[in-house]
Image (tube, rainbow, N blue to C red):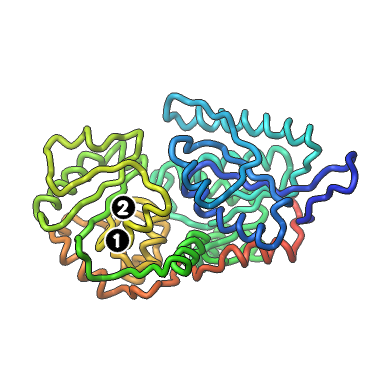
């Protein structure tokens, strides 16, 4: 696989690497990879595709990261059905194939990140079209298809298709090897989400300060298994925390499809519910947060790097490193006093930038590898 666009003849195919994203987490984690290509004057080697899976709140971060999208899917859906979304995405990939053919663009490889429906469908498309697939953030596992659902199935299936696996941690690499994948196809890079944090910290002199003028408890809940089965229990627990800790401000970042506020019957003075925020807005919230309550994987990584105590509303997490270090923990029924939770996790964690999920150089390692190597497609 070549990494340089070939444009010497109008009759010759241009070889491009397709980079595909469609959700905010994918965009945020692929942005530093795209930026690294651009720094090396290799942007023309890429063909960037937005599947539009998160149509409502992805554009502000596309603008922030200054990403020029080459193709955007016309993804129109009126329900949350996964099979419907998967079908629409495959149809859009077919339309993309026809467009690339007209433009005489030959995909040398497809890069996707994580465990979304977009990443899963991109891997299927690459398999159907016999195009090498490169998976960023490979090897995360809970070994339970229901936790998280459907992400665990997606990422395991992607691993069976991918030619190159960029694993964020040594544990992720070991998971892949245990599943029978060749160690020569697996490379530990760190997680690219940390690249964004280190760049922001450098440019903005970010300082995570343990002494808060306002004790902010940041909340995000979005996993399907929680929304479908545990939401009332989670709401009741959050309301309990708000009443027990009237001196603290609780900020719940809602998901547009769930409308948490309508499900909370009692008005709580110290609970505020807001719509999803941009990367920059999230960084501002991190500066104020003394605790994060979440079921998000990406937030576990960011909070882990920044040393923000994290209470995880899940039974299993694929980001086990934070729990091993002791700066995050699963929620337990006995966790009634948040001050005790915070003090315990703070004692365990180093607030001067933990590198359990990456050191800020993942994108450099990924692009270095892609420049130095050629990829052979699986038989």
Which residue is pictured at 66% across the width and 58% down the height?
Answer: 37
Which residue is pictured at 56% across the width and 37% down the height?
Answer: 51
Are the residues flagged by discs 2 and 1 in contact, CB closer than 8 Å? yes
Report which residue position mark 2 lands on. 294
Q: CA distance from mark 2 to mark 1?
A: 7 Å
Q: Secondary structure at mark 2?
A: strand
Callout 1: few (<14), some (14-19), or many (20+) C-alpha neighbours within 10 Å? many
**The disc label shown at residue 310, or none:** 1
Q: In the rendered picture of this protein, how many numbered marks are placed on residues?
A: 2
Whole-percent x, y for residue 14 in the image: 81, 45
- Residue 21 location, quadrant: top right
Residue 161 appears left or right of 64: right
Which tag, 2 or 1, sits closer to the chain's start?
A: 2
Which residue is pictured at 18% across the width and 37% down the height?
Answer: 264
Q: Point out the image quarter for the N terminus.
A: bottom right
122 or 154, nearer to the observer:
122
298 relative to 73, above or below: below
Asked if residue 123 can be seen in this view, the reply is no
Whole-percent x, y for residue 82 in the image: 47, 32
Callout 2: few (<14), some (14-19), or many (20+) C-alpha neighbours within 10 Å? many
Q: Furthest residue to the front?
A: 204
Whole-percent x, y for residue 143 in the image: 44, 52
- Residue 293 location, quadrant: bottom left
Q: Secondary structure at mark 1?
A: strand
Asked if residue 175 can be seen in this view, the reply is yes
Whole-percent x, y for residue 348 in the image: 29, 74
112 or 56, nearer to the observer:
56
Residue 45 appears left or right of 315: right
95 relative to 154, above or below: above
Which residue is pictured at 69% across the width and 38% down the height?
Answer: 128
Residue 204 appears left or right of 128: left
């Amino acid at each position: 696989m070549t990494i340089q666009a070939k444009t010497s003849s109008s009759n010759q195919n241009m070889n491009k690497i397709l980079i595909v994203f469609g959700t905010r987490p994918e965009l945020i984690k692929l942005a530093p990879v795209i930026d690294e290509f651009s720094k090396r004057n290799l942007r023309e080697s890429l063909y960037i595709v937005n599947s539009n899976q998160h149509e409502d709140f992805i554009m502000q971060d596309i603008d922030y990261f200054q990403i020029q999208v080459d193709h955007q899917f016309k993804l129109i859906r009126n329900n949350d059905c996964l099979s419907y979304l998967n079908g629409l995405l495959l149809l859009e990939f077919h339309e993309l194939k026809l467009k690339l053919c007209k433009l005489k663009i030959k995909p040398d490889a497809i890069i996707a990140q994580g465990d979304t429906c977009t990443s899963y469908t991109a891997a299927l498309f690459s398999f159907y079209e016999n195009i090498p697939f490169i998976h960023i953030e490979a090897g995360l596992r809970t070994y339970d298809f229901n936790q998280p659902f459907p992400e665990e199935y997606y990422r395991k299936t992607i691993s069976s298709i991918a030619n190159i696996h960029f694993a964020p941690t040594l544990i992720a690499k070991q998971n892949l090897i245990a599943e029978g994948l060749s160690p020569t196809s697996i490379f530990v890079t760190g997680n690219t989400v940390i690249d964004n944090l280190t760049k922001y910290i450098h440019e903005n002199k970010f300082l995570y300060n343990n002494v808060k003028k306002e004790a902010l408890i940041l909340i995000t809940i979005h996993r399907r298994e929680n929304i479908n089965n545990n939401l009332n229990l989670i709401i009741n627990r959050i309301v309990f925390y708000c009443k027990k800790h009237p001196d603290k401000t609780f900020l719940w970042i809602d998901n547009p499809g769930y409308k948490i506020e309508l499900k909370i019957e009692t008005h709580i003075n110290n609970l505020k519910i807001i719509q999803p925020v941009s990367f920059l807005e999230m960084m501002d919230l991190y500066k104020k947060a003394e605790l994060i309550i979440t079921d998000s994987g990406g937030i576990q990584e960011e909070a882990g790097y920044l040393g923000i105590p994290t209470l995880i509303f899940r039974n299993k997490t694929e980001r086990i490193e934070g729990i091993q270090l002791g700066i995050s923990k699963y929620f337990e029924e006995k966790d009634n006093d948040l001050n005790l939770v915070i003090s315990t996790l703070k004692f365990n964690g180093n607030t001067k930038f933990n590198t359990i999920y990456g050191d800020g150089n993942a994108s450099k390692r990924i692009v270095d590898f892609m420049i130095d190597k050629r990829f052979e497609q699986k038989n």
